[in-house]
Image (tube, rainbow, N blue to C red):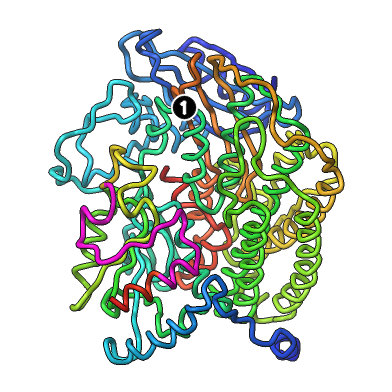
Amino acid sequence: MIGILKNRIIKGVVTRPVKADPEIEKLGAELKGLMHKKFGRSFHIREVDTGSCNACESEIIAATNPIYDIQRFGISFVASPRHADCLLVTGPVSKNMRLALKKTYEAMPGPKFVISCGDCGLDGGIFKDSYYVENGVKNVLPVNAHIPGCPPNPVAIIKAILAFLKK
Amino acid sequence: MDEAYIYVKPGNFKKACLYFHKKLNSPVVAMFACDERRKNKCFRIYCVFMGVKCKKWVFVTMDTAEGASEFESIARDIHSAGLSEREIKEMFGILPKGNPDLRSLRLHDEVWPEGFYPLRKDFNAPESLGVEKKEYVFNKVEGEGVFEVPVGPVHAGVIPPGHFRFSVAGEPIINLEARLGWTHKGVEKLFEGKDVNFGVKLSECVAGDSAFSNSNAFCHAVEKICKIDAPEKAMFLRAMFLELERMYNHLSGIGGIATDVGFSFPAMYASVMKETLLCLNEKLTGSRYLKGVNIIGGVSADLTLWKKKALLKALEAMEKDFRELKGMLYSSVSFMDRLDGTGVLKKKTAEDLGVLGLAARSSGIEKDLRKDFPGIYSKIKFNAAKEYSGDVMARLNVRVNEFEESVNLIKQFVDKIVPGSVISQDKIEFTGGIGLGYIEAWRGPLLYWVKLNSSGVIERCKIADPSFHNWEGLCYSVLGNIIPDFPVCNKSFDLSYSGNDL
C-alpha cells in the first residue's frame, strides 16, 4: 500500500495534453460545454467489434488510458447498449456478426448514433469483396460518422468523436 | 532446408502420422488441405509435426483418390488433429471419416448454406444467405441442478466477439464450450491470386496485436521459396522489432490480469508503459503497431544513431518502471492468492490438445522456436522462460520473465547491428514452390505455409496461429473454477479471436 502511494506521488499526473493538436484541449473544453447542453453532461459509447483485427480495439482502449484519458471530456465506454448514446463499430462486418450488430443497435434507446472506426469499417478496406464480409458498417446500419485510419491512433479517435459532437 | 515432405499412400497416412507423433513427441501443429484438382485431380492433405531434436518440420502428405473427397480421420488417435480436420471439412468439403465432431467452426450454420466450400478453387459465393434455419448444437451436460450460462458474442468490454457456453451446477464450471468464428473474414481466400507484396499487407491485418509477427512469418515463407537472403542486419532488426511487439503485448496482458481481479492501479501503470512503448515504435518505424516494416527481402526501417539512442534510453526507463510494476503485483498478498491455483492447465492435457507457446511454457512444456529453431537467435544468448504449475500465476510469471528477457535480447541485438543495407540487393526472381515461414510470436509459434506459382502469385496460404489450439486449452483450464474467475483465466491465455477465426 505504501509502495502504491509512493508511486502515485512520484509519478504525479501523467495525463498529457493531446500534443498533436494544441487546439484539442480548447476544443475539448468547448465541447464539454456543448455536451452539457446536448447530452446532459456525458456521452456514452458502446463498442462493437464486427471482425476487426483488434488493432482498433487496442487503440480505443489506449484512448482511455491515463495518458489520453478520454473520460476527462465526458466520453465513456459502457458495458451495455441500453446505456449508450452511440455505437462505435470496428471491422468490415462479417456475416456472422451481422445479426448481433443489428440486435445491439435495436437494444439502444433513441436518439442513437453510429460511428464506424477503421479503414475496413468504411467499405471493407483490405477485406473488401471477401465472401464473408458486408463491405462496411454502412451496409448494415445508418452511419453518422467515420474515423479513418488502420488503426486510427488515440488522438485521431478523440478528435473524430469531438468533431462529430460538434456537428 | 528445414522442411521434410513425406508422401504416403492414403492407406498409410494414419500410420505415418502416428509414427511421427510418437517419434518426434510433437502434436499436430498444423493440418491443412490444398486444392490440386486442376493439376493432379485430387486434394492434397498435409499434416505438420515439429521435430525439435532433428531441427525439421515434418510434413506427412497424402493425395485423396481421384474424384473422392474423403480421408481417414486421425483425430481419435491424435487429439490435436481434431479441430484441423473440422476446418478441412468446412473449407474444402473433404470428409474426415471417423472424426467424432464435424460441427462447423467459422461458417456458422445460421448464415451459411450447405455445400459451399470457400477454399476450393471452383468456389462461387452463394447468392442468398441467412435462409438456413439450422442451429448449432452445443455439448450438453444433463443432471439435477445443471444449468447453462450463455455469454456473447457481444461482450461488456471493448473486446472482440466470441460465444461462451458454461454448464454449471452451483458455482463451479462443469463444462465450457467456446463457439468462435464470429470475426471470420475469409483471409486465406483473400490471399489467393494476389501478389506477394499485397500478401505482406494483408498478413499485417490478420491479427492487429501481432501485425509484425504475421508479416515476418509471411516474408520468411516467401523468402525461403524464392531463395532471397535478407542481410544479417535486417534479420537482427526483425528480431528486435519482434521483441518490441512481445513487450507491449506482455504489458497489456499483465495489466489485463490485474484489471480482471479488480487491482486497477498496476493495470493503469502498465497501460502507461504500453503507451510509451507504442510511441517508441512510432518513433522508430512510423507505425505504432509496426505495420509496413517488413518487406520481402528485408525491412523498411533502419536503426539510425539517434533512434538507437532513443531506444536504449527508453529501455532503461522501461526496466525501472517494470521493477516498480513487479513490486506492486508481487507484494500484494490478495492478488497473489487470487492467481495461485486458478485456471490450472495440466501438462498432459496441454500436450494432448497441442497447446503451444506461452500457455504451454507455463504448463511445463519447454518449447520455444527461439530456442528450438533459433535462426538469428543462435548468435546471442537467450534463456527461455518456463513454469510448471500451469495456473494463472504461472502464465503471469512466464510473461514477466519474457518481458525482462526481451529487454536483454534487444540490448544484444542493438550491439550486433552494424551499418549496412537493410534490404537484399538481389533482384527478386520468383520461382514457384512451397515453403513454411515460422516465428515465435508473443502468443507462440506462428506458421505461414505458402504456395507460389512461377510468376509470384499466391496459390494457397495457410495460417496457423497458436490461438487455434490454445482456445481448447482455455476451455479445459477453467473446469472446476467459478464463472467470476473466467475473465482472469481468459486474459492469462490472452488469445486472438481474429487470428483464430481468420
B387 left or right of A17?
right
Query: Looking at the image, is B172 positioned above or below residue B284?
Result: below
Looking at the rendering, the stretch of residues picked out in magenta corresponds to A135-159
**Residue A20 left/right relative to B192:** right
**Judging from the image, what secondary structure is the residue with disc 1 in?**
loop
Q: Is residue B121 above or below residue A113?
A: above
Q: As rendered, which of B99 and B252 lies closer to the eye? A: B252
- Is residue A73 positioned above or below B47 on the image? below
Asked if residue B300 can be seen in this view, the reply is yes
Determine crowd level at label 1: few under 14, some 14-19, many 20+ residues with C-alpha closer than 10 A.
Answer: some
A23 in the magenta segment? no
Q: From this viewpoint, is residue B152 visible? A: no
Residue B407 figure quarter: bottom right
Magenta region includes residue A145: yes
Quadrant including the C terminus of chain B = top left
Asked if residue B428 lies left or right of residue B112, the reply is right
| Residue B106 appears left or right of B410 | left
- Give the residue at x 39% y 43%: A126
Q: Position of residue B334 (x, y in %)?
A: 65, 81
For the point 39% across and 30% down, the residue is B88
Determine the residue positioned at 21% across, 64% down: A103
| Amino acid type at mark 1 | Asp
Of residues A16 and A9, which is closer to you in this image? A16
x and y percentages locating residue B220 in the rendered image = 63, 31
**Image mark 1: chain:** B
Q: Which residue is mark 1?
A: B195
- Give the quarter of the image for residue B102: top left
Name the spot of residue B325 as percent of width and height, x first: 72, 74
Q: How many marks?
A: 1
The image quarter containing residue A65 is: bottom right
Up-down: is B194 above or below B4? below
